[in-house]
Amino acid sequence: MVSLFENYEQQYSVLTADITAQIGLLGASATKDRRQLISNIEKHVEEAQELLEQMDLEVREVESNKRQRCRTKLDCYRAELKRLTLEYIKARSIKQGALSYDSAEEFNDVRISGDQKQRLLDNSERIERTGRQLEEGYKVMIETQEIGTQVLQNLNDQRETIQRTRSRLRETDEELGRSSRLMSSMIMRSIQQKVILFIVGACFIIALSLGLYLGLSK
């Protein structure tokens, strides 16, 4: 199954092939043909720029093991489009410098083309800035995600530590309960033994006293 990123790649390849072919035709075309070629090239360049922006967004959804390869491709595509843009500007400039302007309309075309050239350069720089900003934003997002993951891991470790501590406290409480019951049992036995000794002693004293009394009576 072809991914959305690969689909964008195919569209981009078709556009850059058309741009390359039309730049080659631009140098040998007549004035009227040049206008149509210029319009087509600029339209295709803008479409290619939009595709690169879509690819830059889509690369974030690519599997992590393929993401770096897609980013490398995207960087190559950006460099290629910039090169084609510069070739287009150069082709227009060379041709226009060689032309003699027979009418005010042709002179205005040259003046307008200068504005278009600047616009293309501005667009190219804007794409690069946007790409860098998106890249920086993506790095910040990854760092934030890593920090969040670490915090969650720390919280999970602390929760496990608290649970283990609670378990130890319960065990300690049970041990104290058993010790308390044992001590109570030992105290009760000691009291019982003392009572028995007291009764035995009392009986012995009574018996002794009774024996003495009987002896004296005789």
Image: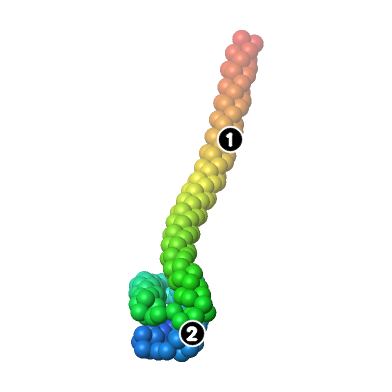
Q: Is residue 89 above or below residue 191?
A: below
Q: Which mark is residue 35?
A: 2
Q: Secondary structure at mark 2?
A: helix
Depth check, front residue: 184 or 131:
131
Q: Is residue 46 visible?
A: no
Residue type of the residue flagged with mark 1:
Ser
- Residue 171 percent across, percent down from the top left: 52, 46
Q: Which mark is residue 184?
A: 1
Q: Is residue 102 left or right of residue 80?
A: right
Q: Count every numbered label the image shows and give the total.
A: 2
Q: Secondary structure at mark 1?
A: helix
* Residue at 53%, 43% in the rendered image: 169
* Residue at 46%, 82% in the rendered image: 102
Q: Are marks 1 and 2 in contact (CB under 8 Å)?
A: no
Q: Is residue 114 above or below residue 45?
A: above
Q: Which mark is residue 200?
A: none
Depth-wise, is mark 1 or mark 2 nearer the camera?
A: 2
- Residue 63 percent across, percent down from the top left: 43, 75
* Residue at 52%, 47% in the rendered image: 162
- Residue 143 percent across, percent down from the top left: 44, 56
> Sequence-wise, which precedes: disc 1 or disc 2?
2
Depth check, front residue: 157 or 124:
124
Q: CA distance from mark 1 to mark 2?
A: 108 Å
